[in-house]
Image (cartoon, coloured by chain):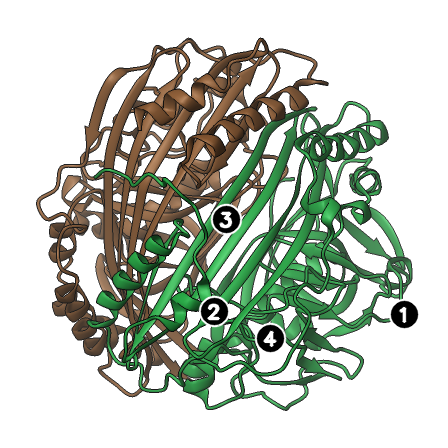
Chain colours: A green, B brown
Amino acid sequence: MVARRHSSRAEADLGAAARSLPSPCTGDLRLVRSTSTTIRFANGRIHQPHLERSTHVSVRVADGKRLATATGSDVSAAGIAELAATARSLSRIAPTERKFPGFAAPSGRAGRAIAYSNSTAGLSPERATAIAEELLEAASSEAPGARVAGVVTVGSESLRVANSSGLDRDTARSFAVASVLVQRPERDPPVSGWSEGAHWDASRLAPARLGREAAERMARTPPRAVEPGAYPVVLRGPAVAELLRFLSHLGFAANGEVEGWSCLARRREKRVAPEFVTLVDDPRSRETLPQAIDFEGSWTAKTGLVEDGIARGVVTDLLSSGRLGRKLTGHAQPPEAPWGDWGPVPCNLLLAPGDADEEEMVRECRRGLLVTRFHYVRVVDPGRGLITGMTRDGTYWIENGEVAAPARNLRFTESVLTALAGITMVGRERRIFSDGGNTVTTAPVATRAFRFTSATLF
Amino acid sequence: MEELIRTALAATESSSVLHADVRLVAPERFISLSVRNGAASALTDGRTEALGVRVRTRNAWGFATTSDLRPGPVREVSHLAVRLAEAAGRHAREPLRVTDDPGPHGGRYETPLQKDPFAMPLDSVVELLTASEKALHVSREVRSGIATFQAWEENKWYGSSDGASFTSRIVHVGAGLTATAVRGSNVQRRCVPSSHGGDFAQAGFEFVEGLDLLTRAPEGGREAVRLLDAPVCPTGSTTLVLGSAQLALQVHESVGHAVELDRIFGSEAGFAGTSWVAADQIGVLRYGSDAMNVVADATEAGGLGTFGWDDEGVPAQKTPIVHAGVLVGALSSRESAAQLGLRRSGGTARASGGDRAPLVRMTNVNLEPGEFGFDELLEGVSDGVFLESNRSWSIDDRRLNFQFGTEFGRRIHHGELGELVRNPIYSGMTPSFWGSMDAVGERSTRHLWGLPNCGKGQPSQVARVSHAAPVARFRNVAVRGG
């Protein structure tokens, strides 16, 4: 097959394209443009610098209540017309989605871009490289001779959505994300430390602080073996972020509610955490990587997930709100990638801060573990919210309120509901963590009992 | 297309650039049809185009990509790739080294197809999915039924400043079913023919027809419901017989990733992790029992990791990885092979598209069959479990401590398969687990499984790989009910 050559990239009028879908078809269109620079470094050098400019357009057509989507990268009027024809052709053979409520008509107004940094969006390759160098050098000077590895990603993304009901909205966001590992692979067993952070403004990323923090978290003495068992834990921000991502998928994703396998399906409006625990999804907060509209053009809004310890409802898009008969919360993902098993999920989590700091949490712990982050976490049993994963890059044994010694890494197999119910303290200083798909803004957390089921050799 | 590649290469010409290569993937097509609970959860026809320019200066790589294939934007990303490499190389202490593999001059590779999924009407596919999904619902307790079909077409043009070039058209297809039965917080799932979306191959639609989904769907639904009433898998150290699909994933996680040279050298330390294997242990490290033989075979017909040349222009190869339990090889790119002191790359540098730089990836990493029939494997077991079809998977960042859950288990009593058990989990440490493998199934128990979702790299890349695995037996494995 021969690829088409774009002789012209004159951008089509997305709104006009949506309105021109032939009757009785309705539909919506998305245009995503992104520019990003990713600088990876390892073993003291930048080894994978990557710059990307991409355009993605998707057209979803509903022939009555039969839906299908076509995607491409040609944003010309002819390119979009071709996608619309492909989607329409596919929609004719689709099974009927009886509860599809139709495409939302426009209502209300809200800001187009909630937080956007022009300097971050326009960062040159050389400046992005300099941020990575700052991170690398800060970590290296703090831990001379150690292996330093990590990544800096900066860039911007714009989203425009139009539909046949007249909706035509756009938004944009900038982002800067960094992480760093400091490791002594030559030690037996190897030891390592970790730090990460994200912000919509690259000037607030504080790469040198991240580099120093990762180095400080690396064990200076050989880690000791800890017997598997249930222990109180103090979880640093990256570890909390990972647990909250899994809680949000297992408890607040729409498909789990529709199909009955959500671990919170029978616990809505019931107490699942202490009263001082409040978790919201707020894509409009400037303390996350904000997004003003979702991929169906709905305005995003703050959604309570756990309020004063009480479990609330799931998040929705057009289809799941129709299936559940619940209000639309503005959590649509692109229809061509509806997140597999999950359906719409919260993507901008914020855990309300408490008033403790990490030292106080450790002081309150008689025998337990301080965990920096988790690795390779996967669902074991969705109905019970059971997940498993490893600790990584800075695990410490706590004894009598003090960090007593580095610990070898352990595997946990625990329910997110047990971890949530057992929270005893929440930290006051929050940071933004992004894994590319989800953003979590959280402070460290202490939880009463966390079950570790095996140990590894390092 | 060739002109566009020449344009991109010409724009990389600079006194600092020692090598440049360009991959143009246009179009890359993706069809995803998914029917969930009687409705279309996603019917998608996707088409992307991307050109990626990679340059090497004395000290560093640079990579830039665009989806705009006009000459102007293409020249611009070439210039950006050079700027990135020059910026990255400023503080490098040592020069980059790569092997001097000669590239092809004008070769072409194409997937052999009987029924091209991109040239056939899709209505019959949607009908098959709709009927199969409906057939999963054998009981009201089957709360979720999903039937999926996926097909990818990658049209690639490769050219380098050394004059190397090739083109390829690779087609992957696959399909599968998932039935989820729910009773309170007891959630049980069965997939047909296996988890992770079913089964996948480099083939045409004839492969999907061979999966026989419609016939197998009711049994998938019935097994999910039966699991609701099954006892929880007992806990203890026992003899474990692993089915082919679960063993394929075991190979993937505890062998395939562990022998990627970029992990071994620390290049992935900040994200995916490293490896318990050290570079100087290749040739001497005891990885498993004498019964363990593993190859990385990018030439096996039907594999998702089969191609003509990798994304550095290195020809597809079959490389021994473990021979009689001893580690003898690794997966490599031109850079990592040179770092190991090899003269030639193993040809496993792959990118997930024109918009990504090649990384060391798996191809078809296969556990070679042994001599035991399935019944013979069971005969040696007085008390144990047979586990199959992955449900959860996790392994530490050096690929040592693992824990896998499977969709179902069957007790083994005195050489016979017995009752069904639910929520089985087994765990172990990579070398001791492979060291405990005392019997490997014969060729008739072997199946080449396609895995379409292997993640690695920043920005993220999802690779499609395959693993052939027979059935095998392991002694003294920690098993429990989750």
N-terminal of the two: label 4 or label 1? 4
Asked whether residue B233 appears in the rendered view, the answer is: no
Identity, as a three-letter code, of the amino acid under mark 2: Ala
Counting other residues with Cα less than 10 Å from the Cα at mark 1, is it few (<14), some (14-19), or many (20 or more)?
few
Tell me: A87 left or right of B49. Answer: left
The one of A27 and B168 positioned closer to us in this rendering: A27
N-terminal of the two: label 2 or label 4? 2
Relative vertical location of residue A325 with respect to residue A39 in this rendering, above or below? below
Q: In this rendering, do the residues under marks 2 and 3 share a single chain?
A: no
The residue labelled by disc 3 is: B402
Q: Are marks 4 and 3 in contact (CB under 8 Å)?
A: no
Counting other residues with Cα less than 10 Å from the Cα at mark 4, is it few (<14), some (14-19), or many (20 or more)?
many
Q: In this rendering, do the residues under marks 3 and 1 share a single chain?
A: no
Tell me: A413 left or right of A214. Answer: left
Q: In this rendering, do the residues under marks 1 and 2 share a single chain?
A: yes
The residue labelled by disc 1 is: A355
The one of A454 and B260 positioned closer to us in this rendering: B260
Foreground label between 2 and 3: 2
Relative vertical location of residue B37 with respect to residue A161 in this rendering, above or below? below
Chain at tag 3: B
Return the x and y of residue A449 as percentages of the image width and height: 71, 69
Instruction: Please give the label number shown on residue A299.
Output: 4
Relative vertical location of residue B61 with respect to residue B134 in this rendering, above or below? above
Identity, as a three-letter code, of the amino acid under mark 1: Asp
From mark 2 to mark 3, how far is it between C-alphas? Answer: 46 Å
Res B397 → quadrant: top right
The residue labelled by disc 2 is: A162
- Label 3: state its secondary structure: strand
Q: Are marks 2 and 4 in contact (CB under 8 Å)?
A: no
From mark 2 to mark 4, how far is it between C-alphas? Answer: 13 Å
